[in-house]
Amino acid sequence: MPVTAMPASRPPERTAAPPHAAALVQRLATALARRGVRYCQWKGRVRPDMPHRTGGDVDLLVDRRHAHAFAEVADALGFKLALAPAEGQVPGVVSYLGVEPDTDRLVHVHVHYHLVLGRLWTTHYRLPLEEVVLDSAVPHTPFPAPAPQFELLLLVLQGTLRHSVRDAVHQSALARRWATRTALDALELEVSRGALLGAIAHCVHEVDLAFFDRCRETLERACPLWRRLIVRRQLERRLRAHAHPRTMAGAARRLARLPRRVLGRGPTGGKHLVTGGTVVALVGADGAGKSTCARALTHWLGSELHVHWAHLGRPPRSLATLAAGALLKSVRWIEARVGMRHGPAGRYFELLRYLCTARDRHRAYRRARRAATAGGIAICERYPIRENRFLVGPSLAQRGRLDLTGPLAEFLRHRELAYYARMAPPDLIFVLRVAPDVAVARKRDEPADYVRRRAQRIWETDWSQSRGRIIDAGRPLAEVLADLRVRLWEAL
């Protein structure tokens, strides 16, 4: 629908910060104003879902001469610089991640030193409009915003470039189009036709007013998909002088990740902190909530970062482990039939199973280490360390078949110990410590004496040598998770 005549453009009135506004976002805006950083929120200012959000994404255009000042402000507020996957990295665009203190949600701040339109992981377009947009910035809450005519122009161009075939069915695309139309309705109340014509003529020489109207029509609900795609292609041809095409290597990497995204396996994010990857171990007795906390941390960090989850206590079993377990059950069945329980053959096969389990744990450890080496965060349950070998460790630490002697038994034990010896300590250890009585009350599906004995060992262990961070897991789950998120984010 063509833009109709509107009253003369006017700066939006300064309004008081809404009570639902995120505290971290408000603190960032205040700190940037005090430091005198030249910037504005170049898109996403008008969002219908902001009253229900306390974090989310923020897109800021920052004068690159103030990049150092912005980095200092972000660092002081606890933001961490993150890198997109190789195929998604764009010159002049960086990401900062922070934690909203009241809700523990991750706040993602996209910092643009270049004004880049389109999908960042495919062909995108850098328009040299940074100075014009920054010069037009007017006060707004919480961040300054471009003059409405520039914001409207950029919103329409960005919405047109993001049209794709999956828009017809993808729920996130439908929600984005609804948010875009709502923002357009709000901006068009502030922009006159003359002001819009001046912005187009001054900023984007490749686009005239008639073509802009066609782009605007594609954002209407009634516009068919085929017309959206045609207009998008026409706009891409007009802007091809500003294009940064995607590489074949990037396209291949995205294609390789497609099965994991379709099957719902792996994180939805993919960014890496510039400080590097980290192996995080969650240790504790039964009933301490390790699995629940590991799932919560994986979901929390995985929304933005590349996160790898591993359970080293119960790693994926290899064919060798399955075969050893089947042989052990068969031998025990035969021994029971002939009246010879726990005979020497069964004990040897039990040692063999211990060896295969150690190999599986080492393979899971190796995958976690590789994920961290590549910049990801590996969340590991029951990580084998010296202090908890009685829970997850070699047969000697668990008193398994110590009565066996001879060259074969020594060989099996030696090979088993070698796998554990090759597991380096984790980078971070969080000890979920719970009182034995509480552990027994929580773990009703296990024998009480068994649970109490293991919890007592964890309770009495000296964790100072391992630099383990003690978390009181006897509290309600919400308090434990809040404490865990804060301490983990500070340590990353």
Image: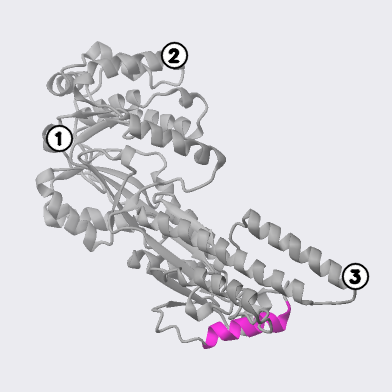
Image coords of residue 51 (percent x, y): 40, 47
Q: Which residues are magenta?
A: 447-460
Instruction: Please state, as top left, top right, bottom left or bottom right, where the N terminus lies in the image.
Output: top left
Question: Mark 1 near mark 3, Cβ–Cβ under 8 Å?
Answer: no
Which residue is depicted at the point 87% across and 72% down? Answer: 336
* Image position, residue 352 (x, y; %): 65, 68
Report if the CB atoms under discs 3 and 2 are less than 8 Å apart.
Answer: no
Taking the spot 44% from the left edge, 48% from the top edge, the residue there is 52
Of marks 3 and 2, the one in the foreground: 3
Q: Which mark is residue 130?
A: 1
Residue type for callout 2: Trp
Residue 216 horizontal side relative to residue 287, left or right: left
Q: Is residue 434 magenta?
A: no
Q: CA distance from mark 3 to mark 2?
A: 73 Å
Which residue is at the far left? 65
Main SS of the magenta segment? helix
Quarter residue 458 falls in: bottom right
Q: Residue 185 or 238: which is nearer the viewer? A: 238
Tell me the SS state at disc 2. Answer: helix
Magenta span contains residue 456: yes
Foreground label between 1 and 3: 3
Q: Residues within 10 Å of mark 2 (few under 14, many from 20)?
A: few
Q: Position of residue 442 (x, y in %)?
A: 66, 74
* Number of residues whose C-alpha sits closer than 10 Å to that of mark 3, classed few (under 14), some (14–19) or many (20 or more): few
Q: Residue at x 34, y 27 (%)?
A: 159
Corner quadrant of residue 409? bottom right
**Residue 337, which numbered label?**
3
Does 23 appear above or below 413? above
Would residue 249 be seen by someone viewing this image from the given angle? Answer: yes
Cα distance in 3D space between marks 1 and 2: 32 Å
- Identity, as a three-letter code, of the amino acid under mark 3: Arg
